[in-house]
Image: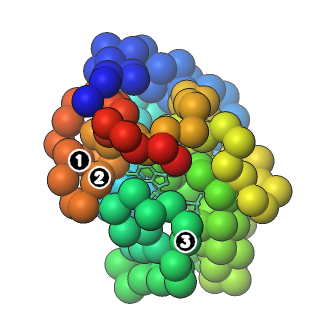
Amino acid sequence: MDVLIPAEQIRERLDALAAEIGRAYEGKPPVTVVGILNGCLMFVADLVRRIDFPVRVAFVTASSYRGTATSPGRLEIHDGLLPDLTGRHVLLLDDILDTGKTLTRIVAHLLDRGVASVKVGVLLRKVGRQEVPFEPDFVGFTIPDKFVIGYGLDFNDEYRHLPYIGVLEGGEG
Ligand code: XMP
């Protein structure tokens, strides 16, 4: 496996991203960070500790991918863990923007629930894969079209614990 983004580089980028988010939300509480499980695990944990205004943290689950098969199946959204978000400003965080379908669906879902606004932050954005028009507000890193693992991202539910982003051997897209 090759290391694509070392842990130190992730830490530095998160410092900058948290500052950017702070400026975007200045004077605009109450904010709820909503992470999309399971891939957001590290990203949310590390980012919220750098945000210097009060936030609530909540999670949704969405699943459509199995292994390296990046042609999406049916997307299932489980929002049973979400508190009442009516009137809240939501910062939705996901590990990776690939085709854009997951985030498009979840943003629509949150708007249906009566949130005041939704901004989207992704740790990674893959180039050349997007199938639906979607512009995230905050992007950690733009990466090539490779299947990546680590720092929350998995292959068959393994490798999430790695502190860096790696490229799985033979893992195209
Ligand atoms: P879409 O295509 O809807 O998908 O933007 C976003 C979700 O797809 C998964 N995904 C990956 N997971 N390595 C992974 O471990 C990858 O390279 C990868 N590409 C997409 C991921 O669950 C993400 O939330």
**Residue most toward the right?**
133
For image coordinates 55% across by 71% down, the residue present is 72
Q: Secondary structure at mark 3?
A: loop
Q: Is residue 15 visible?
A: no
The answer to whether residue 24 shows anywhere in this view is: yes
Q: Amino acid at mark 3?
A: Pro
Q: Amino acid at mark 2?
A: Asp
Asked where in the image residue 19 lies, by quadrant, the reply is top right
Marks 2 and 3 in Cβ contact (< 8 Å):
no
Using the image as rendered, state which of residue 163 and residue 149 is in the foreground: 149
The picture places residue 164, in percent across and down from the top left corner, at 28, 28
User: Are discs 2 and 1 less than 8 Å apart at CB?
Assistant: yes
Q: Are marks 3 and 1 in contact (CB under 8 Å)?
A: no
User: CB at mark 3 closer than 8 A to ligand 1?
Assistant: yes
Mark 2 sits on what residue? Answer: 154
Q: CA distance from mark 2 to mark 1?
A: 5 Å
Label 3: few (<14), some (14–19) or many (≥20) C-alpha neighbours in 10 Å: few
User: What residue is pinned by disc 3?
Assistant: 72
Please identify the quarter of the rendering in which residue 57 is found: bottom left
Left or right relative to 147: residue 110: right
Q: Which mark is residue 97?
A: none
